[in-house]
Image (tube, rainbow, N blue to C red):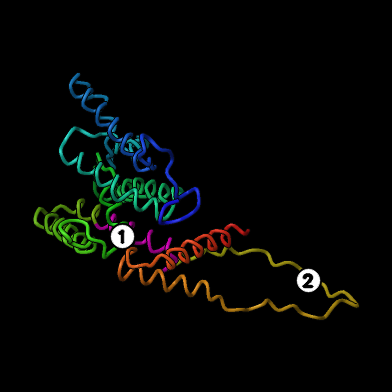
């Protein structure tokens, strides 16, 4: 049982020599394997094969749709790649433990596909290319949104580091007049923040109502004229859950007491049962 929840979704996939293995660790193994294969292909001079992997809006619009999915597998060895893998383990694991494995994987897949799909649309006006993105920065932004006050580096809080990094990357993009990098940066920021807040219940997406044919009604003689009004009752449990989420947003998860953590888990399970109709 971990400190974030009690369902199987919040538990590790498996254990290895006493260490918990989460889906975030599996992602790192996949990217590390891609990096190793990239290095072997570069050593053997198979640049024709490697050239099929990166995303290019021009090539995708020309029919090479697989590049939307393959761009992340072009990973030449670098020190920054190692840092990204560490970020996926540290921050991805915490996001997975908070939301559960299913929601975490939904977030990661959405984060991975969001940029190439956006750039494909932008490619109708200007060419855009992309390769080697692992989604590590988006996972850090999701962590900073969940736990803004948690110390991460030299007692600097996660929200402060996020502000600094986003600001620095923005200035770099402006100084180089790199519109594509700015679009990628702020699209990642927006997607990560919006996904976390949506999963926390802070806002809901608008639902499209398609026009439907109204049924014909008939009045039957002798029918029961009594109407049934739905019961309306306040839900103090949900109000208490909202208060706990507000406290987490202000002061981080570590600010919760043991009793509050139990109430948070109970509220999360109640929401899951309610959403699944059980």
Q: Residues within 10 Å of mark 1 (few under 14, many from 20)?
A: few
Residue at position x 32%, y 63% from top?
Answer: 254
Q: CA distance from mark 1 to mark 2?
A: 47 Å
Q: Which residues are magenta?
A: 186-202
Taking 276 as reference, is 132 left or right? left
Between 104 and 155, the one lying in front of the other is 155
Residue at position x 53%, y 63% from top?
Answer: 271
Between 128 and 33, the one lying in front of the other is 33
Q: Which residue lies most toward the right here?
A: 222
Taking 135 as reference, is 264 left or right? right
> Does the magenta-highlighted stretch encompass residue 157?
no
> Which x, y percent locates residue 12?
42, 44
Residue indicated by mark 1: 190
Q: Main secondary structure of the magenta part?
A: helix
Secondary structure at numbered mark 1: helix
- Sequence-wise, which precedes: disc 1 or disc 2? 1
Residue 143's label in the rendered image is none
Q: Which residue lies most toward the top here?
A: 44
> Which x, y percent locates residue 186?
25, 58
Assign the C terminus to one quadrant of the image.
bottom right
Quadrant of residue 232 within the rendered picture: bottom right
**Callout 1 touching callout 2 (CB < 8 Å):** no
Secondary structure at numbered mark 2: loop
Residue indicated by mark 2: 217
Q: Which residue lies most toward the left here?
A: 175
> Which x, y percent locates residue 264?
45, 65
Between 256 and 222, the one lying in front of the other is 256
Query: What is the count of numbered marks?
Result: 2
> Which x, y percent locates residue 125?
27, 51
In the rendered view, tell whether residue 272 sits above or below residue 74: below
> Does the magenta-highlighted stretch encompass residue 197?
yes
Taking 80 as reference, is 27 left or right? right
């Amino acid at each position: 049982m971990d400190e974030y929840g009690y369902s199987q979704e919040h538990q590790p996939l498996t254990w290895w020599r006493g260490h918990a293995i989460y889906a975030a660790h599996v992602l790192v193994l996949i990217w590390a394997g891609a990096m190793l294969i990239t290095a072997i292909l570069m050593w053997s001079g198979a640049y024709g094969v490697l050239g099929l992997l990166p995303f290019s809006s021009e090539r995708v619009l020309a029919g090479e749709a697989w590049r939307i999915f393959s761009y992340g597998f072009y990973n030449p060895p670098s020190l920054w790649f190692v840092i990204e893998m560490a970020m996926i383990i540290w921050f991805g694991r915490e996001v997975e433990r908070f939301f559960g494995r299913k929601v975490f994987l939904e977030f990661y897949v959405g984060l991975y596909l969001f940029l190439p799909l956006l750039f494909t649309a932008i490619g109708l006006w200007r060419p855009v290319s992309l390769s080697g993105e692992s989604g590590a920065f988006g996972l850090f932004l999701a962590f900073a949104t969940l736990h803004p006050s948690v110390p991460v580096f030299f007692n600097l809080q996660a929200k402060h580091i996020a502000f600094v990094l986003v600001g620095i990357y923005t200035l770099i993009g402006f100084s180089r007049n790199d519109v594509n990098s700015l679009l990628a940066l702020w699209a990642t920021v927006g997607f990560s923040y919006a996904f976390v807040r949506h999963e926390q219940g802070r806002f809901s997406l608008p639902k499209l109502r398609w026009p439907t044919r109204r049924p014909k009604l008939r009045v039957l003689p002798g029918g029961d004229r009594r109407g049934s009004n739905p019961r309306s009752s306040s839900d103090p449990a949900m109000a208490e859950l909202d208060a706990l989420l507000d406290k987490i947003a202000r002061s981080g998860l570590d600010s919760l007491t043991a009793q509050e953590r139990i109430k948070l888990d109970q509220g999360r399970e109640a929401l899951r049962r309610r959403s699944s109709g059980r």
